[in-house]
Amino acid sequence: MLLFIADILHWLENTSWAIGIRQSLWLYPVLEIVHLTGIVILVGAAFMFDLRLLGFSNNLSVYGLARHLLPWSQRGLLLIIPSGILLFITNSQTLGTDPTFWLKMILLILAAINVLVFHKWIFKHQINSKAQGKIILSSKISALISIMVWVAIIACGRLLAY
């Protein structure tokens, strides 16, 4: 099984796309800029929403803020996913065996699960809460998890560069 994965990583790194990106003077840096811009958009919007859930800016409606900010997080993903895949293939053999890379992937899955649970159950309960304006505990816990996980994901991403 490990040999099969090693073969896939080797093949990815030697695709014409990966070679083209590595050999281009400007393509890899542009992909990094696109990736980082997507992270700023996604995480910035998520952090602002998470801070509202933690009690900051109480004058703003949680529902209104969600409708405004969360689509920006989704747009950030449209930049992050393709650029991240292209950045990965340029160095897939090294990244595919790096524990920091796999920690980042696990944290991304945890972030996705947190978002899914929040939007499927917690946020619906928050909106239907009888105490309008009061943030329920499960929303605060989800916000804390979100902030901690995104900080850890960003830290892993930076550590991979060194």
Image: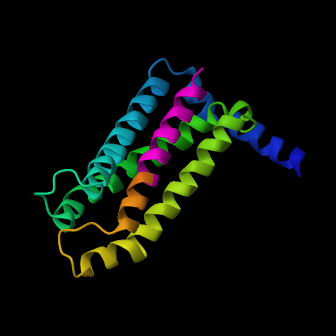
Left-right relation of 63 to 14: left
Q: Which residue: 72% across, 39% down?
A: 96
Q: How many numbered dots are placed on residues in this image?
A: 0
Left-right relation of 50 to 62: right
Of residue 147 and residue 132, the one placed in the foreground of this image is 132
- Majority secondary structure of the magenta segment? helix
Q: Position of residue 27 (x, y in %)?
A: 46, 26
Q: Quadrant of residue 139?
A: bottom left
Q: Quadrant of the C terminus?
A: top right
Identify the residue at the far top of this view.
Answer: 25
Of residue 39 and residue 93, the one placed in the foreground of this image is 39
Left-right relation of 66 to 136: left
Instruction: Please say if 45 is above or below 26.
Output: below
The magenta stretch is 145-162
Residue 161 highlighted magenta (yes or no)? yes
Q: How is the image coloured?
A: rainbow
Q: Position of residue 81 (x, y in %)?
A: 48, 48
Instruction: Please say if 78 is above or below 40.
Output: below
Instruction: Please say if 159 is above or below 78.
Output: above
Left-right relation of 96 to 24: right
Residue 130 highlighted magenta (yes or no)? no
Identify the residue at the far left of this view.
Answer: 59
Q: Which residue: 59% across, 43% down?
A: 104
Q: Which residue: 55% across, 28% down?
A: 21
Q: Position of residue 138 (x, y in %)?
A: 40, 67
Instruction: Please say if 14 is above or below 62.
Output: above
Q: Position of residue 35 (x, y in %)?
A: 43, 37
Q: Which residue: 36% across, 60% down?
A: 140
